[in-house]
Image: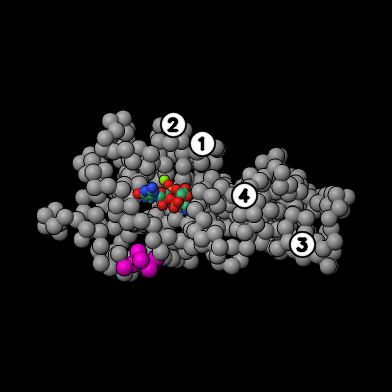
């Protein structure tokens, strides 16, 4: 009904498509002046203004509109839609039921990254984004239990662009929703293949950025990934940071409950580096803490880091949470953590982030168990 009303307000030469649950994209050739935009958006908003009568219920809806202009803001459709999406996000944040025209000034990345940002849209079309997988192993046996999915961008001339450079840009311009949805779906499918090779159950961990987590459609994206891969929710761990939870705890509570309904587990990434409000460990259904590399890298020499790791492990034990130590690079760190009862580790020592085919070879050869000194292995295997 909403679609029919919206369509009536547009010209025959305009194009309108429903692109998600409650999301529409309209392409309006020749509409770019302020006056034209004001007129059309006014009509669109008004079209939804009168209530809908459905089964004796009166339903009121409103809309937020984001606008990008060709060729002022971008020259290709992927980027135009992403910029309109960013503008729509701002319309929602600033009061809903209104329209916002994209402006690079307000939401753009720092000046020096503009060319990188432009290249990212190109990269999406060219398929330059890839996923690497880093093993998460059981500390005592070094058997692979799961993998963390880490995004990579292989630029034809710049080479591998690290996620710390491109994720923040994707976060500002909204591209993260597209990339994140792809990563989640691809990772779920990939895990199926990993399990086939390993002939046992594994799990897959996927990073969810704050903007993805806040996105209205995140649960649809999650359901789609699980349905498409026919992966059971309990095989999936979603990594979020403390910051993501704290932006809007009420919203977080709702979303986390819905994730728990799907039996997906929640991990707190970079634990200890964010707000570190312990109250949220009580409030939210969290299953895993990932101790940040910052607390691991100077182990076992640093007494302070050792104390922090001990405290986290103790806390986790009493709250019945699993712990993954991140960034384990040396045998000494491994020994320290294993000795303190840290069950899972992830780091260069037991496997760098690697392409899927390498990860499968690692699973096949049970490579990490074989790296163990033989006297230890004799005791375990
Ligand atoms: P993260 O989720 O905390 O991922 C762990 C980072 O530590 C990865 O960096 C990994 O390569 C690195 N690492 C693992 N073991 C070691 C080690 O032994 N030594 C050292 N020095 N580093 C180690 P990476 O891949 O560069 O990713 C950086 C961050 O980018 C991630 O931190 C995550 O926050 C973000 N990121 C990566 N992929 C995605 C994604 O698909 N979606 C989102 N939203 N964020 C992502
Ligand atoms: Mg992570
Ligand atoms: Mg981390």
| Disc number lying in front (4 or 3) | 4
Identify the residue at image location x=40%, y=64%. Answer: 355
Pointer 1 residue = 246
Kind of element beneath mark 2: loop
Tell me where the magenta segment starts and ends, as one range.
356-361
Task: Return the disc, 1 or 4, that comes first in the chain's sequence.
Answer: 4
Q: Residue 165 location in percent, x, y?
A: 54, 50
Identify the residue at image location x=79%, y=50%. Answer: 45
Identify the residue at image location x=54%, y=45%. Answer: 210
Task: Return the disc, 2 or 3, that comes first in the chain's sequence.
Answer: 3
Local packing at callout 3 (Cα closer than 10 Å; few below 14, some 14-19, many 20+) is some
Assign the magenta stretch its main secondary structure.
helix
* Nearer the observer, 232 or 307: 307
Vertical comparison of 271 with 41: above or below: above
Q: Residue 103 location in percent, x, y?
A: 73, 47
Task: Return the disc, 4 or 3, that comes first in the chain's sequence.
Answer: 3
């Amino acid at each position: 009904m909403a679609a029919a009303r919206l369509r009536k307000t547009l010209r025959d030469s305009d194009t309108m498509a429903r692109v998600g649950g409650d999301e529409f994209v309209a392409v309006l050739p020749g509409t770019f002046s302020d006056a034209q935009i004001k007129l059309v958006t006014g009509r669109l908003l008004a079209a939804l203004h009168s209530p809908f009568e459905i089964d004796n219920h009166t339903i009121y809806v409103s809309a937020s509109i984001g606008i990008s202009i060709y060729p002022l803001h971008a020259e290709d459709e992927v980027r135009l839609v992403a910029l309109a999406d960013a503008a729509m996000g701002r319309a929602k944040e600033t009061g809903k039921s209104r329209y916002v025209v994209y402006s690079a000034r307000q939401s753009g990345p720092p000046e020096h990254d503009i060319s990188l940002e432009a290249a990212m849209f190109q990269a999406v079309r060219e398929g330059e984004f890839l996923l690497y997988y880093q093993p998460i192993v059981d500390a005592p046996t070094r058997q692979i239990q799961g993998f963390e999915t880490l995004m990579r961008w292989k630029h034809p001339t710049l080479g591998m662009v690290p996620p710390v450079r491109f994720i923040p840009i994707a976060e500002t311009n909204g591209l993260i929703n597209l990339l994140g949805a792809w990563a989640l779906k691809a990772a779920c499918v990939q895990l199926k293949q990993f399990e086939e090779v390993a002939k046992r159950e594994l799990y897959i961990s996927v990073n969810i950025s704050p903007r993805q987590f806040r996105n209205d459609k995140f649960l649809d994206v999650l359901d789609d990934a699980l349905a498409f891969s026919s992966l059971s929710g309990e095989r999936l761990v979603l990594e979020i940071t403390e910051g993501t939870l704290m932006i809007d705890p009420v919203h977080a509570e709702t979303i986390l409950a819905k994730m728990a309904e799907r039996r997906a587990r929640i991990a707190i990434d970079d634990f200890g580096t964010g707000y570190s409000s312990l109250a949220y460990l009580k409030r939210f259904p969290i299953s895993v803490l990932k101790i940040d590399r910052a607390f691991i890298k100077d182990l076992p020499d640093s007494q302070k880091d050792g104390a922090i790791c001990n405290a986290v492990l103790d806390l986790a034990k009493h709250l019945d949470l699993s712990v993954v130590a991140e960034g384990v690079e040396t045998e000494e760190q491994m020994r320290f953590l294993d000795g303190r009862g840290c069950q899972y580790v992830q780091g260069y020592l037991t496997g760098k982030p690697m392409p899927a085919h390498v990860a499968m070879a690692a699973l096949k050869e049970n490579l990490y168990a074989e790296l163990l000194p033989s006297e230890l292995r004799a005791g375990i295997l």
